[in-house]
């Protein structure tokens, strides 16, 4: 038998209904919080740490994509140069930053491929402490010498260089952008495979090393092609060969070191890519990757990079992670075989 309606029963029924609606609203609001937080990113400037001095290829590539990301996301993407320890100092800052998408690093083959094998103690794990975003570009290195010094010593080719270096061990100085960089390791691999010895001088980035090379304080460098290109074109540096397995379209007259000196299997290229601290939300990682890939595919940026000798990528986080794993394995063997040590 149905209960008779009374004012008290009507009030209780109405209150329960209101309470149910409030509960649904609260639960819906809580469920929407992650989505709101996600859509709010970025709500402030994003920092891209370049773990080398300004002016080198790592810096050049970071500054090429930063304005595009700023336009895409409506917030400044600011470059912060923090050189030292072969890129380890600046990279470690990112490894220990909050995984909120506001601190990224332009990692390199040195920071995320070579250094793990070269340094006895690493402040970070290149795999566990990072979330790969995308490979920005691959770059061949180029063997360059101070042009005036090369003329004075009668060195016009790689065989000439090897002949002089063998006859004068330790008399030539080899600059690099820092211990563990591909610039350093290309030189160590060359020394190992040719039986030559040059004194290694590590700098805090490619640009300061190049300035001393152009100025005559250094003799030789295996620099990244984009940062060396202006000095090659000006005639201040003499380019002997590229360190990649194939010639570079940006420097077509330069042979590979494998061909120039009959060094079978010689290959020591560089790469540069964006990474975030481990634990950064996948939604943020994917959004950045998509915008970087889009910017690298614009004619202006693509043509500029290719002209400098860089090959733009923009691959997926998963593809970039696989590259890092394979490079760690590859360079561990190179470091062991060459006997390279941190100076």
Image: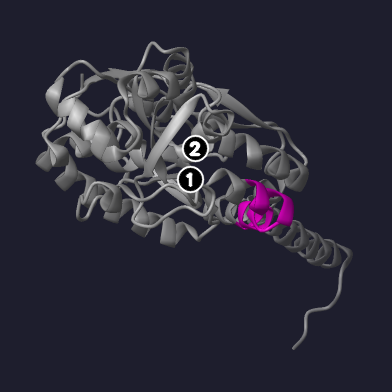
- Relative depth, front residue between 140 and 27: 140
Q: Distance between the residues labelled 1 and 2?
A: 5 Å
- Is residue 296 inside the magenta stretch? yes
Which quadrant holds the C terminus? top left
State whether residue 30 appears in this view: no
Q: Which labelled disc corresponds to residue 106? A: 2
Callout 1–callout 2 Cβ contact below 8 Å? yes
- Residue found 25% across the figure and 19% down from its top: 172
Left or right: where 61 falls relative to 238? right
Where is residue 267 drawn, in percent x and y? Answer: 29, 50
Structure colour scheme? one colour
Which quadrant holds the N terminus? bottom right
Residue named by callout 1 = 273
* Vertical arrangement, residue 136 with respect to residue 21, above or below: above
Left or right: where 259 falls relative to 307? left
- Residue found 43% across the figure and 36% down from its top: 239
Question: What is the crowding at mark 2: few (fewer than 14 residues within 10 Å), some, or many (at least 20)?
Answer: many
Query: Which residue is most to the bottom?
Result: 1
The image quarter in which residue 78 lies:
top right
- Residue found 16% across the figure and 31% down from its top: 340
The disc, 1 or 2, on the residue closer to the chain's N-terminal end is 2
Left or right: where 339 falls relative to 108? left
- Relative depth, front residue between 138 and 295: 138
- Tag 1's secondary structure? strand
- Is residue 134 inside the magenta stretch? no
- Tag 2's secondary structure? strand
* Vertical arrangement, residue 119 with respect to residue 114, above or below: above
């Amino acid at each position: 038998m149905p209960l008779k309606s009374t004012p008290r029963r009507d009030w209780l029924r109405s209150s329960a209904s209101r309470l149910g609606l409030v509960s649904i609203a609260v639960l819906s609001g809580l469920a929407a919080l992650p989505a709101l937080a996600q859509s709010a990113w970025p709500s402030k400037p994003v920092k891209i740490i370049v773990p080398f001095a300004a002016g080198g290829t790592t810096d050049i590539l970071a500054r090429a994509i930063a304005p595009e990301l700023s336009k895409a996301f409506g917030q400044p993407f600011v470059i912060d140069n923090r050189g030292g320890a072969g890129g380890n100092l600046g990279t470690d800052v990112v490894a220990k930053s909050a995984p909120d998408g506001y601190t990224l690093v332009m990692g390199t083959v040195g920071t995320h491929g070579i250094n793990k094998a070269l340094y006895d103690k690493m402040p970070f794990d290149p795999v566990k402490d990072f979330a790969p975003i995308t490979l920005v570009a691959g770059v061949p290195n180029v063997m360059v010498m101070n042009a005036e010094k090369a003329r004075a010593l009668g060195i016009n080719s790689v065989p000439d260089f090897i002949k002089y270096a063998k006859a004068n061990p330790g008399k030539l100085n080899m600059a690099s952008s820092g211990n563990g960089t591909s610039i350093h390791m290309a030189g160590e691999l060359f020394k190992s495979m040719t039986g030559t010895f040059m004194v290694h001088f590590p700098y805090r980035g490619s640009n300061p090393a190049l300035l001393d090379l152009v100025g005559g304080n250094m003799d030789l460098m295996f620099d990244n092609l984009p940062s060396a290109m202006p000095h090659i074109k000006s005639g201040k540096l003499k380019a002997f060969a590229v360190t990649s397995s194939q010639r570079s379209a940006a420097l077509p007259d330069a042979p590979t070191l494998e061909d120039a000196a009959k060094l079978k299997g010689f290959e020591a290229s560089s790469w540069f890519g964006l990474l975030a601290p481990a634990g950064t939300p996948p939604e943020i990682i994917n959004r950045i990757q998509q915008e970087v890939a889009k910017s690298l595919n614009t004619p202006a940026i693509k043509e500029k990079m290719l002209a400098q000798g860089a090959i733009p990528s923009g691959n997926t986080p998963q593809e970039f992670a696989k590259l890092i794993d394979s490079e760690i394995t590859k360079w561990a063997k190179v470091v062991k075989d060459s006997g390279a040590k941190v100076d």
